[in-house]
Each structure stands twice: as C-alpha cells, then as structure tokens.
Image (tube, rainbow, N blue to C red):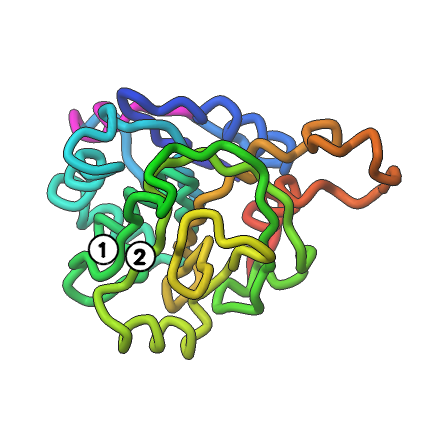
Amino acid sequence: MKALVLRSAGTNCDQESAHALRLAGAEPTVLHINQFLAGHATFDDYKIMIIPGGFSYGDDIAAGKILANELRFKLGDALSRFIKDGRRVIGICNGFQVLVKTGFLPGNATRTQSVTLAHNDSGRFQCHWVRMKREKSACSWLNLTEATWDLPMAHGEGKFMTQDAALLQELEKKGQVVFRYEGTNPNGSQNAIAGLCNADGNVVGLMPHPERHVNAHQHPEWSRRPSSKIDPVGLQFFKAAVQNWN
C-alpha cells in the first residue's frame, strides 16, 4: 500500500513517520507540499496521507496555520476528493493542528474551522510521556487496538477547544472522540480530548506521537516492564491504518 508523508519547511517527524509506515507494511513516500502545488505530484497515487509533527513554517501566525491555508485554499478540492473516496488522512501533533485549521477536522460541509488547539494551560512547551484511553469511536479501524496508550507528547499548543458547548456535545454523541488523556490532562483540553476523527472515521488527528513508540525500547520504563509479544501501541496504530480496510 502506498502512503504519503506530506512535509513542509519546519516539519521534523517525517522520517520517523515513514519508518513507522514501513514497519506496518506500507510503502511510504516523503514529499514536500511544493511538489503538489507545482503540479508535479498528485494525491491520487496514495491510500494514506500522514501530516507529521514538527513546526511547519515555524508555526508563524499560529501552529499549523500556514500549511493549513495552503491545503485549504490551494489543494482543498483534491484533498476533499481524497477523503470522500474513503482514503485515510492522519495528522499527528502539528498535523492535527493543520487539520483543525483546514476544517477537515472535525469536518463540515463548508470546511470552516470550528475547533482549535490553543496554548497549553501551563503557558509553555511540554515534552513528556502521557497516558491516553482509546475510545470506541467512529474510527472503527482503531477499535481493536489496546484500550490504554502510553505515548510521548511534545507541543506548546495542544489544548483542544470547540467553538461552543453544542459542538462539543455533538462530537461526543457522534463518537468522534478517539483518544482522551487519562489520569492527568496535560494541557487543559476540553473533556481531556487528545484525538479526534471526522464522522466517517477516515480523518484522524491526535496530539501525542505514535511514531515515537513503535519499538518497546522507546518507552522510558521499558527495562521495568515485562516483555511482551504485543506490538507497542504506536506500531498498533500504524498497522491498523495500513491493514484494517473494509
């Protein structure tokens, strides 16, 4: 399966994401968005698109905003077709910030932004491991993965917020909440939301980094944990994205 890792100036998790896709059995290609803007590449060649973490365009204006505008105003129709065809778009950290600012998450007919990822309540960049609970959600291809996830986070703007209480209630009711922080809410997100999908479940965004936990030795407590034949949750995430197609 061919997968696209879409990068821009400032992206810094593209190679880790490509490595995770290879481990999951995909054939990843890392391409700069300029290749698409110039017409040298097309989304049609791929079934999965990853928008990886980093600081696209230095996070000028707001985290992910410039890359989001390029996707929304210059490649929006092509990306809409990609999504309507049932192909998967995954935004990790900065990629999640990009997807909410394009309006593709949580998704609506007008592609207008209705949620955001604001500055952490701490007022600073946070880089540490967090525990999440995976919800049973519209993202059905993840529903067979482990229920508890340990992943590292690394962001300054990860506080999930909706435009109003009615939308938050709607997202919960439709099963669009995929991940929730467990134990500690590290950035003050509403309802401790750490990951979200669209109503069809094929566009997913999360703040913590699954590509940074595809090997058991990457966990900070690996030497104290019992050995297991079960894949680390990060690898489970990418294998589910690559292999679980209806």
The correct choice, above or below, for 92 with respect to 188 in the image is: above
Direction from residue 37 to residue 64 in the image, left or right: right
- Give the residue at mark 2: 105
Identified by mark 2, the residue type is Leu
Question: Marks 2 and 1, Cα distance to the nearest angstrom?
Answer: 5 Å
Q: Nearer the viewer, residue 91 or 118?
A: 118
Which quadrant, please, contains the C terminus? bottom right
Q: Which residue appears at 67% of the width and 61% of the height?
A: 144
Q: Are marks 2 and 1 in contact (CB under 8 Å)?
A: yes
Q: Which residue appears at 39% of the width and 56% of the height?
A: 189
- Give the residue at mark 1: 103
Q: Residue furthest right?
A: 226
The magenta stretch spans which residues? 30-38
- The x, y position of residue 92, in whole percent, is 43, 41
Q: Nearer the viewer, residue 205 or 32?
A: 205
Quarter-of-image position of residue 94: top left
Looking at the rendered structure, the secondary structure element under dot 2 is: loop
Q: Which residue appears at 30% of the width and 21% of the height?
A: 10
Looking at the rendered structure, the secondary structure element under dot 1 is: loop
- The x, y position of residue 75, in whole percent, is 18, 41
Identified by mark 1, the residue type is Gly
Q: Residues within 10 Å of mark 1 (few under 14, many from 20)?
A: many
Q: Residues within 10 Å of mark 2 (few under 14, many from 20)?
A: many
User: How many numbered callouts?
Assistant: 2
Q: Which residue appears at 68% of the width and 28% of the height?
A: 218
The correct choice, above or below, for 35 with respect to 47 in the image is: above
